[in-house]
Structures are given as structure tokens and as C-alpha cells.
């Protein structure tokens, strides 16, 4: 049997999935022990036990001045900004993508504009957003929308263009209007693609969110990371980095499960 046709069993698949994580953890532990052996007060690579104790403190101990646990306040602030930004971007992409892909009169003016706009580095316009929209929540959400919406729109419109033309011809033969074709023929087929595109956009969305919070915010995961970096508090930074990674994975997992249950016919997704 060729290797392309071989599949690992559930147990072996779990072991293989864990190997890269164990390798990274092992490399970190070796590097930490080597640095701490030379300098016990080294802050660059704190011991895993130090990180665990710091994580426990951050998750459970309230702030002395406010009496609230800042870790959960930061998490809620970042997730709120992320959810609003991704929701606006995906909604815009769904509507604009279908219209651009379905209607030539929409594709002619907007497809080139979206293509050019997607080439603008989002972080380069962050100062402009702060000047125009202020330093509040709107500018941070706007950066996420500007950062991922153009790519989602292009992906959605291309998906519509790639649909078999025979479907449109048959629908028109049966008397379907353009709106009926968009709602009943195109929409069910692009929704799974939209979820997949949003999953791929979560990484850039987190990047834009952390960048905006690092520059101008008083709450948020990115704000806290850049606040403690001046003290070289790597145990705090690593705790937040691991937490952000876990949140991103859980969001990706949730979207994957939604796609599987809502669109089981769409096939296997990574």
C-alpha cells in the first residue's frame, strides 16, 4: 500500500499530534535550565514552574487597587473587540462577495477596488485610524475590519465565480430571479467557504488586535503584554501568549465544529 493511502489510527494520530508540542516544550525546558544554571535570576527563559505559578496568580488574584482580576478583564476586552471586528468583516464579505461574484455590474467597479485596497498594509493606516476615529474602541475594531475584510470579500467573490454556470442557467430556466438565485443557489454554497475563510483570518485578526491594543488601550491582552515588557516579565508575557494561542485554537475549533454540523456535505476540513 502506498503511503498516500495510509491513515494513522486514533491513538497513533493523537501521539503524532502531540509530538511537535512535546518537542517545543522539551527544547524550551532545556534552554531554560541552561540559562538558569549560568544565571539563576535570568528572566529571559523562566522555568516552567515559574510560569505556572505566575499563571495561577494572574488567574486568581485580584488587583490591589481595583479589586478585580485584570486577566479576565483583559480577556473580555480583547474578545469583545475581536468578535465585533470579525462579525462586521464576515458580514460585509458575505454580502459584497456574493454581489461582486454574481453581478457583472457590481464586479466591474468593485472587484478592482477591493483588489487594490487589499494590498494596503493595515498597520500602516493605524495612525490614520487613530486620528480620524480616536483612540477608543472604534479604531481598534476598524483595524480588524480593514485588515481581513478585503481578503474575505475576494475569497467569497471568487467562490461565487467558480460555481458551475449550469446552476444559474437551470435556475433561470425555472423562472428564478437574481435575488432568488443569490439566496437559494449561491448562499448555501458559499457559507461553508466563508467559515473556512474566517478561520484562516483569525490569525491576522489577532495580530491587528494586539497591535492596536499595544499602541492605545487601557485594557486588553495586547495592552498587558506591552505594559509588562519594560520589566522583562517574561513569565507574565508567556502566560498571556499561551492564553491567546489557546483562545485562538478554541475559536478555530468552534468554527470547525459549526461547519461540520451545519454543512456536513462540505467535506473534511483541517
Image (cartoon, helix red, strand yellow):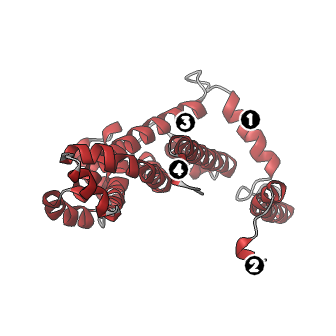
Name the residue tied to disc 1. Answer: 56
Residue 130 seen by the camera: no
Q: Please give the name of the residue rendered at 51% of the width and 32% of the height, measured from the top-left corner.
A: 76
* Residue that extends furthest to the top in the rendered view of this protein: 67
Q: CA distance from mark 3 to mark 1?
A: 15 Å
Res 265 label: 4
The quadrant of the rendering that contains the N terminus is bottom right
Q: CA distance from mark 3 to mark 4?
A: 35 Å
Q: Is residue 221 above or below residue 163?
A: above
- Mark 3 or 2: in front is 2
Closer to the N terminus: mark 2 or mark 4?
2
Q: CA distance from mark 1 to mark 4?
A: 43 Å
* Residue that extends furthest to the front in the rendered view of this protein: 174
Label 3: state its secondary structure: helix
Name the residue tied to disc 2. Answer: 2
Q: Is residue 213 above or below residue 4?
A: above
* Residue 69, position as x, y percentages in the image: 61, 27
- Taking the image as shown, residue 31 lies to the left or right of residue 261, namely right
The quadrant of the rendering that contains the C terminus is bottom right
Closer to the N terminus: mark 3 or mark 1?
1
Q: Please give the name of the residue rendered at 33% of the width and 53% of the height, measured from the top-left corner.
A: 149
Closer to the N terminus: mark 1 or mark 4?
1
Q: Say which of 105 and 96 sits in front.
A: 105
Residue 151: image quadrant is: bottom left
* Residue 25, position as x, y percentages in the image: 78, 59
- Mark 1 or 4: in front is 4
Amino acid at each position: 500500500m502506498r503511503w498516500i493511502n495510509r491513515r494513522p489510527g486514533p491513538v497513533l494520530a493523537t501521539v503524532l499530534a502531540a509530538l511537535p508540542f512535546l518537542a517545543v516544550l522539551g527544547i524550551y525546558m532545556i534552554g531554560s535550565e541552561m540559562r538558569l544554571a549560568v544565571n539563576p535570576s535570568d528572566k529571559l527563559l523562566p522555568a516552567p514552574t515559574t510560569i505556572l505559578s505566575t499563571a495561577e496568580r494572574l488567574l486568581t488574584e485580584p488587583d490591589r487597587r481595583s479589586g478585580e482580576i485584570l486577566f479576565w478583564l483583559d480577556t473580555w476586552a480583547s474578545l469583545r473587540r475581536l468578535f465585533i471586528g470579525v462579525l462586521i468583516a464576515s458580514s460585509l464579505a458575505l454580502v459584497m462577495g456574493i454581489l461582486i461574484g454574481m453581478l457583472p455590474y457590481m464586479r466591474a467597479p468593485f472587484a478592482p477596488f477591493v483588489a487594490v485596497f487589499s494590498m494596503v498594509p493595515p498597520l500602516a493606516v493605524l495612525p490614520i485610524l487613530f486620528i480620524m476615529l480616536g483612540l477608543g474602541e472604534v479604531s481598534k475594531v476598524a483595524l480588524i475590519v480593514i485588515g481581513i475584510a478585503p481578503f474575505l470579500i475576494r475569497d467569497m467573490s471568487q467562490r461565487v465565480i467558480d460555481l458551475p454556470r449550469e446552476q444559474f442557467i437551470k435556475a433561470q430556466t425555472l423562472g428564478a430571479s437574481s435575488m432568488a438565485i443569490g439566496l437559494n443557489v449561491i448562499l448555501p454554497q458559499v457559507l461553508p467557504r466563508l467559515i473556512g475563510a474566517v478561520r484562516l483570518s483569525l490569525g491576522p485578526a489577532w495580530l491587528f488586535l494586539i497591535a492596536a491594543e499595544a499602541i492605545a488601550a487601557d485594557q486588553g491582552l495586547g495592552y498587558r503584554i506591552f505594559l509588562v515588557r519594560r520589566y522583562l516579565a517574561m513569565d507574565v508575557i508567556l502566560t498571556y501568549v499561551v492564553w491567546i494561542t489557546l483562545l485562538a485554537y478554541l475559536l478555530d475549533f468552534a468554527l470547525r465544529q459549526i461547519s461540520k454540523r451545519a454543512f456536513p456535505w462540505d467535506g473534511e476540513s483541517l
